[in-house]
Amino acid sequence: MISSLLFWLEDRQETISRAKQIVKTLGFQPEIFPTFSDFASALEEFKKENRLSEIAGIIIDVMLYGVNDLSPVIFDHHPTDDGMEAGLVIVEHYLRAPERGFNGVPILVFSARLLNSDAKKNLEIINEKGGAKIKYLEKTPGWENELNRWLNSIKPIEIITTKSY
């Protein structure tokens, strides 16, 4: 089975119409979740059903407005700066927490907001711990090409064999 499913956490779906079009054009099926609880519930269900291999990648927004409390999914308190850093907190303390089992899923951190040097360094540190790569993509000129590049890097290759007699 070829994995073309993308889990996407985005609270303001009106801001991603062009990105969603690119994703679909490349043959991916985006499953877009407006809340962290919906996103986490779906991921946990896939994990419980042993279906994580069906998820080709995760796209996550950095700014998830008003997300202050990530419990009951992330039990320890991790400040989100009133949602301005929620996506990064989710990546670090949920998606890349070793006990969660999502380390094999590539992640694209996609945002209109420029990350500060501390946040970029933190993503580098998380990447160095192993697992599928995490890429940060800022919505600046040229972002469409970078999105295409990332999608092509996670796109499975279908191998067709023929028998010769």
Image (cartoon, rainbow, N blue to C red):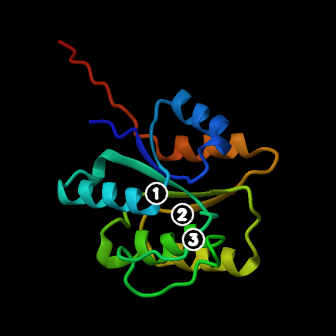
Q: Earlier in the sequence, mark 3 or mark 2?
A: 3
Which residue is tagged 2? 134
Q: Residue at x 24, y 56 (%)?
A: 45
Viewer-closest of 76 and 98:
76
> Mark 3: which secondary structure?
helix
- Distance between the Cα atoms at labels 2 and 1? 6 Å
Q: Residue at x 35, y 40 (%)?
A: 3
> Mark 2: which secondary structure?
strand
Which residue is tagged 3? 86
Three-letter code for the amino acid on which mark 1 is drawn = Pro
Percent x, y of residue 89: 53, 75
Give the quadrant of residue 64. bottom right
Q: Earlier in the sequence, mark 1 or mark 3?
A: 3
Q: How many neighbours does mark 1 have within 10 angstroms: few (below 14), some (14-19), or many (20 or more)?
A: many
Q: Residue at x 55, y 70 (%)?
A: 67
In which quadrant will I find the N terminus? top left
Task: Give the residue furthest to the top.
Answer: 165
Viewer-closest of 26 and 64:
64
Three-letter code for the amino acid on which mark 2 is drawn = Ile
Q: CB of mark 2 within 8 Å of CB of mark 1? A: yes
Q: Mark 3 or 2, which is nearer the eye?
A: 3
In this rendering, the answer to whether 20 lies above or below 72 is: above
Percent x, y of residue 25: 55, 27
> Mark 1: which secondary structure?
loop
In this rendering, the answer to whether 146 lies above or below 22 is: below
Disc number placed over residue 106 in the picture, else none: 1
Viewer-closest of 6 and 151:
6
Q: Residue at x 35, y 65 (%)?
A: 102
Percent x, y of residue 161: 27, 24
In this rendering, the answer to whether 28 lies above or below 117 is: above
- Distance between the Cα atoms at labels 1 and 3? 18 Å
